[in-house]
Image: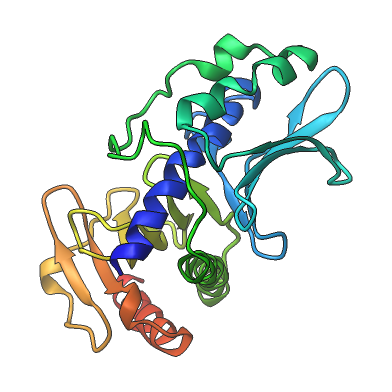
Amino acid sequence: MQAYNILDQHIHQLCQVIAKFNRAFVPKKADDSHTNLQFDIVGERVVGRWVTTEKRKVIMGFHVPSQTFHLYSENWSSLFSLETIGKTQEEIENAWEATLKEWNLSFSEFIAPLHYEIPVYDFLSTPYTKFNQNDMYLWMTYRALASEICFDVLNHVQVEGEVRIWPHHFDTGIYVEATPNVGLGFGLAMKDSILEASYFYYSAYGLNGHSIDYTQLSSLSMGEWIIQEHWKGAVIGIDHTTRNTLHQFIKEVTEQYI
């Protein structure tokens, strides 16, 4: 999974451009969700949120197969495109200056550092190269699966929710209050200190004075419990998952949370 993890990092870094666009021009929300992204499975692109300008509504997206950013109109025509192959991250961000000024959008607000930090990847100052096609399609397959399985969780617990990519940690996920006492977080995370490969996580949070005692939960037939100081929940490695195993994982964990 090493090649997959590296590609995940590259796309994570590239998508900070969309996060900056959202941060600068989408009305702010207290939970920071105005910066969120989404993987458009059909369009094979990561998109941000709609921005209202003096001329029209626009949305920024990154088309993964062509490694190209677009500024889209409401009918999804491309108003501006920017190829990333052969450019560094800094060159990509600076290349938006003329277009933003044309749309009367502040380049200084766009280019400002984000309010959170991501890892300083060793490729940050290196021009991007063409993605390996097999790795790229595997990445899109897993992100598509993550989006679909998030909807399966929402259907399973019968609550409404929004499936988004959080640009900070770059997880495709959901958070919902499933009952008055329990909030649920589910999604696909990047490789991090918890597991050495990307993984699906399922966590619960006590609400209204309720708490989750993870020491009293039964072992899982799919996945495992992780109990750390800063995070507790169930995880299952991406390289051990199919739709059926994920459904079994979700069913077992939900029964213990709710």
**In the figure, 147 relative to 130: above or below?**
below
Residue 217 as seen in the image, left or right of residue 90: left
Establish if 189 lies above or below 11: below
Q: Residue, x 25% and y 79% (percent of image)?
A: 223
Q: Is residue 225 visible?
A: yes
Percent coordinates x, y for residue 144 in the rendering: 56, 68
User: Camera-side residue: 101 or 126?
Assistant: 126
Q: Is residue 71 left or right of residue 89?
A: right
Which quarter of the figure is the N terminus placed in? bottom left
Whether residue 23 is visible to the viewer of this picture, yes or no, is no
Q: Position of residue 141 (x, y in %)?
A: 53, 72
Q: Along the horizontal axis of the image, is 28 left or right of 57?
A: left
Q: Quadrant of residue 232?
A: bottom left
Front in this rendered view, residue 120 or 149: 120
Number of marks: 0
Up-down: is 174 above or below 124?
below
Q: Position of residue 154 (x, y in %)?
A: 54, 68
Q: Name the residue located 52 percent from the left edge and 17 percent from the top edge.
A: 111
Q: Which residue shows up at 62% across the image and 23% down it? A: 95
Quadrant hosting residue 97: top right
The C terminus, quarter of image? bottom left
Query: Residue visible at 28% across and 38% down?
Result: 119
**Residue placed most toward the observer, 33 or 183:** 33
> How has the structure been colored for display?
rainbow
Image quadrant where residue 224 sits: bottom left
